[in-house]
Image: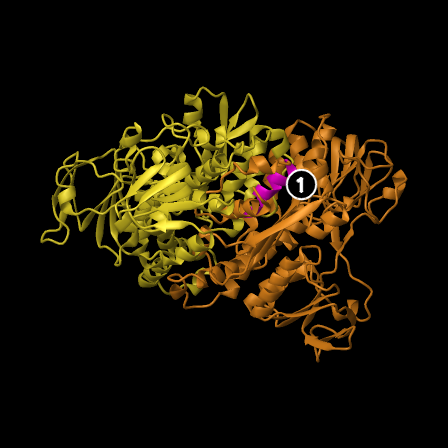
Chain colours: A yellow, B orange
Amino acid sequence: MDSFDVIVLGAGPAGEVIAGRLAEAGERVAIVESQLVGGECSFWACMPSKALLRPAELLAEARRIPGATQAITGTIDAQAVLDRRDEIIHDLDDSGMLPWLEEKSIALYRSRGALDGERRLVLESGETLEAAKAVVVATGSRASLPPIPGLAESDPWTNREVTTAKEVPRGLVMIGGGVVGTEMAHAWTTLGSHVTLVEGERHILPQEEVFACEIVTDALTEIGVDIRTGRKLAEVRGRTGEAGGVTAVLDDGSEVQCDRIVAALGRTPNTDAIGLETVGLEAGGLLEVDDQCRVRGADGWLYAIGDVIGHALLTHMGKYQGRIAADAILGKDVHLHPIADGTPPPRVVFSDPQVAAVGYTLRDAQAKGLNVRAVDVATSGNAGGSFFGNDAPGQTQFVIDEDRRVIVGATFVGAEVAEFLHAATIAVVAEVPLERLWHAVPSFPTRSELWLKLLEKYGL
Amino acid sequence: MDSFDVIVLGAGPAGEVIAGRLAEAGERVAIVESQLVGGECSFWACMPSKALLRPAELLAEARRIPGATQAITGTIDAQAVLDRRDEIIHDLDDSGMLPWLEEKSIALYRSRGALDGERRLVLESGETLEAAKAVVVATGSRASLPPIPGLAESDPWTNREVTTAKEVPRGLVMIGGGVVGTEMAHAWTTLGSHVTLVEGERHILPQEEVFACEIVTDALTEIGVDIRTGRKLAEVRGRTGEAGGVTAVLDDGSEVQCDRIVAALGRTPNTDAIGLETVGLEAGGLLEVDDQCRVRGADGWLYAIGDVIGHALLTHMGKYQGRIAADAILGKDVHLHPIADGTPPPRVVFSDPQVAAVGYTLRDAQAKGLNVRAVDVATSGNAGGSFFGNDAPGQTQFVIDEDRRVIVGATFVGAEVAEFLHAATIAVVAEVPLERLWHAVPSFPTRSELWLKLLEKYGL
């Protein structure tokens, strides 16, 4: 029996953050991971996807700029993009993380693990671990595969394979127009694939403002993505690699030929095989936690962070929960902030144009009963925009709570707007009154002058 | 005699903003401008300089990205850059601004004008104007030309000519390593000039953090700029266009041959010929104002905004003062905010890497007697940085007031950090406590995660 202060189940970003923060504070920490230290995000999601997207995004912008475009007489080098992607994911080798664990004296168990009663874990590798203070569930999620006839048999890809493919696929049918589907449709199209994107809702990116969905839809269509919205996958015929390839049959009877189906249809929490039932909790679902990430139903020793609590399936929110939970375990009076964790968090879709948003969309704010008004401007409709591609589309909208005179939502759409977001995140989370924001002067000539235009338009 | 509610002297950005804001509120407004509506910034400073800088900056970044760099087999097209610059400055034609004035019913007088007693102006074109409520001085500044032997005779350029040159100059000696000198050294070097940059202080950009100056110095040196710091121009021999060209003699006796000297040595306020003496004020200096931009020494009817008050020679600050002064004239209880206007304002140097800063540098905060501590990180030392050029240098520093636990200064250095600044501007101006900033979660994987790393390093 190995004993620790805290045992973390899962070494994705959330697990790493909490393990690191606790170890730095002097706690004896173990982390249990059967796959790669770094998790889904580092190897099969955020990191490889951005590596695939960035070169084309940059070239597209350079092509829009007179003087720069003349220098681009060649084409994107897909193999170099894939090679750089492999560098960024360390060829799916996590040994680069081990010195970090060692430096912090975090014990790594490379095994599956499951709870076996309060504060105890049994590992597939044979060890039994005991936690003096806490066990943290940070096992993340996996791609869901819906029971569509023929889908599983067709040998579909999920986010894992579509972000790490060693060659540019010829033809893909992406099922699901959320972030994964949208980003991967964009990336592979710019690298040479023919992509069909199928989304059941009326718009791709259905959680975002409709104007954002429309701008991205137009941009994807323009580069050649075949977008089918309001459509579902009904059936799949054939199997990748076999003669005749794969046929996706949609619910209107239309058929799309491709090499591979990609299921990008949501996530299932990895809570089905971690022994929750041994401590009286239900397996397979989301874990409900309090504002210090303590699992409800356990007696204060069990914490959960990241995708398994389902607040927001985003790496940065899992890491945030990790920091809060670490401090809670250390006895600090720090809690998830009700705006940071309780309203729609900051999020970026790295398509081109990008969508960067924080807080409520207009319709969500209205559905919440908030007294809100939206104002919007063209993202590049200011002096700073003159130096960006003239024909790059973009719109920015703030949703303003008229009672409290604070921003409760912001959506930026445009070329390279990802870094615009943090200003809005600060304004939303810190509830900075509009009257004070009015004195935060954006620099000329940056595109951030859109802040000025939005506040003027609102009436300041 | 033409009568108005408010007469604005000078149609640069500050003058335009105040005229527009007052006209929108129903005031009868006149604006007096002898040169171009849009002013120095639009035609001979901010706008053309950024137009010259952006294409090379973008290509440099694309060249650092595997997969994208292979597409860049050609070189920057300098003529296309100059043509786009000319488009952005409308070939020095301001007629595009006239519909805006007309729409707002702002009367434009194309003439020099000067005060002739309280609320009265006489124009060179013959008219006399009378203001019922206020006169606003927004006449800006011009490049200073120090009395260095031979300098004036050499036919030097100032910011006006160096930003609007119709051909790429062969050899330039820039006197002054402030923003103009640094940006123009960068721009023209990337377009093919040989540039020597002479700065009297120990570093170029001497107002900024030393690490920022050093990073930019290294980057400029690497592209071929010959930087001479701690040196002054002692004498100039020869004249541009004449046989033998121009020789700049520095104070250590060294000589630099060039085609043209560029004086980038500071600004002189345009207050010497606007009739200030007719209302009992001194001509030629800066105008002192209260926190609603009312000129001290006048009886509440005279306002001044922009470079003539000398608070910060920045377009966005002149515009800010214009908004405040407009509201003051309209009787609103709005004042220049002591942080926004009273501490070093947001500012960006559009070199590559860029320098974006707001508030105090560490040494300025210490000189002010603040109890501060600085923390710093590599700008791209986070997951988001993986997708930017690996060998692009960059550092970011926050200066934190330990007593109040707020950020009082921030300096970002790196590729394309201009849009990082507004988040810091909001945090500084709104005095958001560190404990609240801790809950403003930067999105993964954006480079804005440097916020997280800085706060962690500070001890949160």
Q: Is residue B165 visible?
A: no
The spot of residue B394 in percent (x, y) is 55, 57
Question: In front: A314, or A217?
Answer: A314
Please, what secondary structure does the residue beneath circle 1 have? Answer: helix
Query: For the stretch drawn in magenta, what is the main secondary structure?
Result: helix
Task: Specify the quadrant that holds the N terminus of chain A.
Answer: top left
Residue B422 sits inside the magenta stretch:
yes
The spot of residue B227 in percent (x, y) is 66, 69
Q: Amino acid at mark 1?
A: Lys
The spot of residue A335 in percent (x, y) is 50, 31
Which residues fall within the magenta stretch? B420-430
Question: In front: A294, or A171?
Answer: A294
User: Would you say B208 lies left or right of A183 here?
Assistant: right
Quarter-of-image position of residue B387: bottom left
The spot of residue A132 in percent (x, y) is 42, 38
Q: Is residue B46 above or below residue B131?
A: below
User: Would you say A335 lies left or right of A207 here?
Assistant: right
Task: Specify the quadrant that holds the C terminus of chain A.
Answer: top right
| Label 1 CA crowd tier, 10 Å (few <14, some 14–19, many 20+) | many
Q: Is residue B220 above or below residue B5?
A: below
User: Would you say A411 lies left or right of A75 here?
Assistant: right
Give the residue displayed 60% in from the left and 62% down from the top: B215
Q: Is residue A287 visible?
A: yes
Single out the residue that lies furthest toward the bottom. Answer: B244
Residue with the mark numbered 1: B319
Question: In front: A452, or A381?
Answer: A452
